[in-house]
Image (spheres, rainbow, N blue to C red):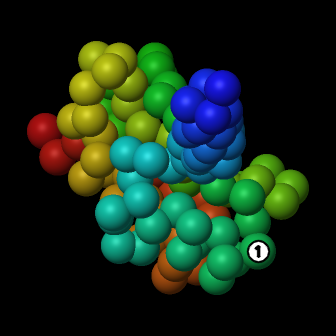
Amino acid sequence: MHMLFTKICLVAGMLSHLLRRRKPSLYEPYERLKPSPRDVERATNLKVLIRGVRWDDERIKGRLRQVDDVLYVEFKDETPGYFWHIDTVSELLRLAMLGCRNIELYDDE
């Protein structure tokens, strides 16, 4: 009986640990960038949303725009699932920290 109680306590402890785990962040792929999306949110008091977009103009590689209290960091989403856009997102976050709110980045080609 004592052994069964011990096993139940162990299982309950493992379950409570699993339930307390933090939820994954929306910014997980971008948290190591400097500045990070959280840094930009703190500095600007704006909610930062990072998303992939497809534009008709293929020269655009990224865009930063503010709509109300949201700062959209948009990048060209050519190949979903790959992170070719990290440099573009990093550049846009840096520009946001410098005070830019509406800007487009173009490919050098």
Q: Position of residue 44 (x, y in %)?
A: 69, 77
For badge 1, the amino acid type reads Asn
Callout 1: 10 Å neighbours few (<14), some, many (20+)?
A: few
> Of 22 and 67, which appears nearest the observer?
22
Q: Residue at x 64, y 82 (%)?
A: 43
Q: Quadrant of the N terminus?
A: top right
With 40 as the anchor, is 69 left or right in this view? right
Residue 62 appearing in the image: no
**Residue that lies at the very extreme toward the right in this rendered image:** 68
Element type at mark 1: loop
Q: Please name the residue shown 50% across and 26% down the image.
A: 53
Quadrant in which the C terminus is drawn: top left
What residue lies at 17% left-to-right and 46% top-to-bottom? 108
Q: Which of 95 and 32 is in front in this view?
A: 32
Task: Tell me residue 64's x, y (percent).
Answer: 55, 53
* Viewer-side residue, 54 vs 14: 14
Instruction: Describe residue 91's horizontal placement relative to residue 56 as left or right.
Output: left
Residue 61 appears at what percent x and percent y?
34, 39
Q: Is residue 53 above or below residue 91?
A: above
Does residue 58 appear anywhere in the picture? yes
Residue 16 shown left or right of residue 26 in the figure: right
Q: Which of 98 and 15 is in front in this view?
A: 15
Where on the picture, by quarter, is residue 78?
top left
The residue beneath circle 1 is 45
